[in-house]
């Protein structure tokens, strides 16, 4: 049976925080009595609040089972967003408190793999200067990070805005180009070879970035230029740690990654770089935020740290 979902205007005007809090406690306890106690209302009051939100949404959110009230598919969806809303409120309060007390507040930043070394250096310096600044870091692909920027889940992201269908929706301060390296485990037969042609990797099993991502496109373009077919059954991941771990687990694998990340792995004995030349990705990465929105205080501090000591000093639009 299909149901009419309330409009955004109706949800925004009629949803109340107490309703969302009750849903979270019901999911936690499975009991109206216990949920009511948690939010300091009577059980009849909790029943009334649950009825209000189910009437607003036009559908039941819970099923009564022997172990208590259990959220259905819609209930789980609503509860997930209720938790996000409460989490955002908690972060809002923490940041307001920190700012009121003269502390650094909270910073949420996203980053692509290739920018991790640059970001970690900047964060180490920033936290030495502002030890009370709370920082959350998310590593993902540019496309997913832009979604987090859109949703306000991160203050800024170090990524590429060009992967979006609407790059004009973002402000981007250009940081760096991203040269690539081909890496293998130190136990790979080609590790330590003085010269390696890309053709020597024909038939190799690859760890590759997800389809349509810039690093994957660059790899397939270079392989095609060398007359090598794109890997048919690659292991796809955007995770730095997964790439390092898989190379250790299977020394026959070959991976492409940003040179800065490869240098980090080489320094700690995790990988060996092969002497294969790959060009930089076509679009440099930068600090991306929503167009027209001013950076948060924490984001401003990070941006200053990322550009400290660079030629020209001040950030420049990409």
Image (cartoon, grey):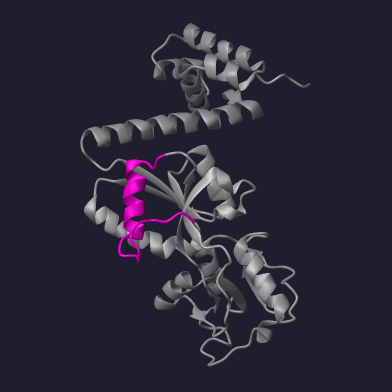
Residue 228 position in % (x across, y down): 73, 79
The picture quadrant where one finds residue 94 is: top left
Residue 49 position in % (x across, y down): 52, 11
Give the answer, above or below, for where 20 lies relative to 245: above
- Farthest left residue? 101
Identify which residue, 316 or 233, lies in the foreground: 316
The picture quadrant where one finds residue 267 is: bottom left
Q: Residue at x 51, y 68 (%)?
A: 178
Identify which residue, 70 or 193, lies in the foreground: 193
Give the answer, above or below, for where 239 lies relative to 288: below
Inspect the magenta stretch and tell me whether residue 303 lies in it: yes
Q: Is residue 260 visible?
A: yes
Which range of residues does the magenta coloring cover? 294-318
Give the answer, above or below, for where 64 lies relative to 86: above
Identify which residue, 26 or 118, lies in the foreground: 118
The picture quadrant where one finds residue 73 is: top right
Give the answer, above or below, for where 11 lies relative to 93: above
Q: Residue at x 50, y 60 (%)?
A: 285
Q: Residue at x 69, y 71 (%)?
A: 220
Residue 169 position in % (x across, y down): 55, 43
């Amino acid at each position: 049976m299909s149901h009419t979902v309330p409009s955004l205007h109706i949800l925004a005007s009629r949803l109340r925080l107490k309703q969302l809090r009750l849903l979270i406690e019901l999911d936690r306890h499975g009991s109206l009595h216990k949920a009511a106690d948690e939010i300091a209302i009577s059980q009849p009051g909790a029943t009334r609040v649950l009825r209000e939100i189910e009437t607003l949404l036009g559908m039941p959110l819970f099923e009564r089972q022997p172990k208590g009230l259990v959220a259905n598919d819609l209930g789980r969806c609503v509860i997930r967003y209720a938790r996000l809303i409460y989490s955002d409120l908690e972060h809002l309060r923490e940041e307001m408190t920190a700012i009121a007390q003269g502390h650094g507040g909270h910073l949420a930043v996203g980053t692509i793999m290739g920018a991790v070394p640059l970001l970690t250096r900047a964060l180490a310096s920033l936290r030495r200067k502002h030890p009370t600044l709370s920082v959350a870091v998310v590593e993902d692909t540019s496309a997913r990070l832009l979604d987090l920027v859109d949703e306000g889940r991160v203050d800024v992201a170090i990524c590429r805005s060009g992967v979006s269908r609407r790059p004009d929706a973002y402000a981007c301060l250009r940081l760096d180009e991203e040269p690539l390296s081909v890496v293998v485990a130190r136990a790979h037969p080609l590790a330590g070879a003085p010269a390696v042609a890309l053709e020597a990797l024909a038939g190799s099993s690859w760890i590759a970035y997800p389809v349509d991502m810039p690093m994957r496109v660059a790899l397939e373009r270079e392989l095609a230029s060398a007359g090598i077919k794109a890997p048919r059954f690659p292991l796809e991941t955007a995770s730095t740690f997964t790439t390092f771990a898989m190379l250790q687990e299977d020394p026959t694998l070959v991976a492409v990654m940003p040179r800065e990340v490869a240098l980090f792995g080489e320094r700690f004995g995790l990988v060996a770089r092969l002497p294969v030349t790959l060009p930089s990705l076509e679009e440099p990465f930068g600090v991306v935020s929503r167009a027209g929105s001013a950076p948060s205080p924490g984001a401003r501090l990070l941006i200053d740290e990322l550009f400290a000591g660079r030629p020209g000093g001040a950030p420049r639009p990409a």
